[in-house]
Image (cartoon, rainbow, N blue to C red):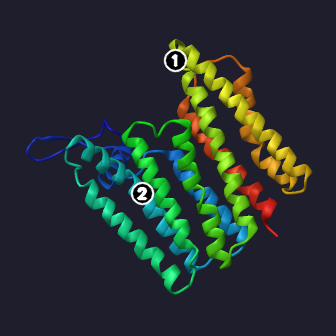
């Protein structure tokens, strides 16, 4: 149903029917759901990868998925409450929602430690909460969009990979840390690439765009050299190079071509597609 369709009542009142997207936006706003689409991929792609590499899907993995989802959703309410508290204003129910989401996360995660004896989830969870607290403080000071702030957020989100692998296997294995490290390196690429594309839309920020160009070039050069070194020494399979190929290629293309207009929505969709390629080939890299 489109926004120009109308519904006429007996009293002659005109009611505009909301579009489906407007209804979704209303639900998202009332539930204080995260707005960043890319962050969902940064959470669930490593999570699914950890499960696929472990080769096991069970009820305890689903409980972990619920716990991680509620912690992730709680972040938005936490930020709204914290900013409102700093300004001495009401949070519009954000505090209550935050407590509900954290409570649901604890409800889903507690059985994993009590009944399944996955005690290593405790230090992992504490690390996530520390990173979440730092990110909240940075957001209060408007520093969460810096390279450091976004890198810390990615480190927290990609912990989903080792957590899922650990819960699925029931024990720690070295591959879990490889999944975390490579996932963090992969998604950190988007920090430098997106900043470069965004600044390309602002001709008045030429100096900032040049800095972003160098940062993007240096990071991807480091990434490429590191991957080749790991492949030559036998630490990773060549499939891992294929997993990173799309983001390396798009970064090189963006660095080489002149700055121009960008469709940021299209950029976001492509980033999600690239992450699916990463998921497939990283699974092939580490799956026994």
Local crowd size for mark 2, using a 10 Å CA cut-off: few (<14), some (14–19), many (≥20): many
Q: Position of residue 4 (x, y in %)?
A: 31, 35
Mark 2 element type: helix
Q: Earlier in the sequence, mark 1 or mark 2?
A: 2
Q: Of the numbered discs in the image, which one, if any, rests on residue 73?
A: 2
- Depicted 164 relative to depicted 93: above or below: below
Name of the residue lying farthest toward the bottom: 115
Give the residue displayed 10% in from the left and 41% down from the top.
12
Give the residue displayed 62% in from the left and 68% down from the top.
164
Horizontal side of residue 274 vs 203, given as left or right: right
Q: Of the numbered discs in the image, which one, if any, rests on residue 269?
A: none
Give the residue number, with chain letter if any, for mark 1. 202
Q: Position of residue 250 (x, y in %)?
A: 71, 33
Q: Position of residue 270 (x, y in %)?
A: 63, 40
- Depicted 198 relative to depicted 89: above or below: above
**Residues under numbered marks 1 and 2 in contact, where contact means CB atoms less than 8 Å apart:** no
Quadrant occupied by the N terminus: top left
């Amino acid at each position: 149903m489109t926004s120009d369709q109308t519904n006429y009542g007996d009293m002659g009142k005109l009611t505009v029917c909301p579009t489906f997207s407007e209804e979704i936006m209303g639900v998202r706003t009332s539930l204080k759901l995260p707005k960043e689409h890319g962050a969902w991929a940064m959470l669930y792609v490593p999570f699914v990868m950890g499960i696929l590499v472990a080769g096991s899907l069970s009820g305890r993995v689903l409980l972990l998925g619920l716990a991680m989802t509620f912690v992730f959703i709680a972040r938005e309410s936490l930020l709204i409450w914290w900013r409102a508290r700093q300004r001495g204003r009401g949070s519009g129910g954000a505090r209550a929602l935050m407590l509900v989401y954290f409570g649901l996360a604890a409800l889903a995660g507690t059985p994993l430690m009590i009944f399944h004896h996955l005690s290593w989830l405790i230090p992992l969870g504490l690390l996530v909460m520390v990173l979440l607290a730092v990110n909240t403080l940075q957001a209060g000071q408007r520093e969460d969009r810096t390279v450091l702030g976004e890198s810390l957020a990615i480190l927290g989100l990609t912990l989903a990979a080792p957590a899922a692998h650990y819960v699925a296997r029931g024990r720690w294995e070295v591959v879990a840390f490889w999944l975390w490290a490579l996932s963090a390196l992969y998604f950190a690429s988007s920090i430098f690439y997106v900043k470069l594309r965004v600044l390309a839309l602002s001709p008045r920020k030429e100096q900032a765009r040049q800095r972003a160009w160098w940062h993007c070039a240096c990071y991807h050069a480091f990434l490429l050299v590191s991957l080749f070194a790991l492949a030559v020494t036998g630490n990773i399979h060549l499939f891992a190079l294929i997993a990173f190929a799309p983001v390396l290629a798009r970064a090189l293309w963006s660095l080489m071509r002149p700055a121009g207009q960008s469709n940021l929505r299209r950029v976001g969709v492509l980033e999600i597609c690239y992450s699916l390629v990463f998921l497939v080939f990283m699974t092939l890299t580490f799956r026994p």
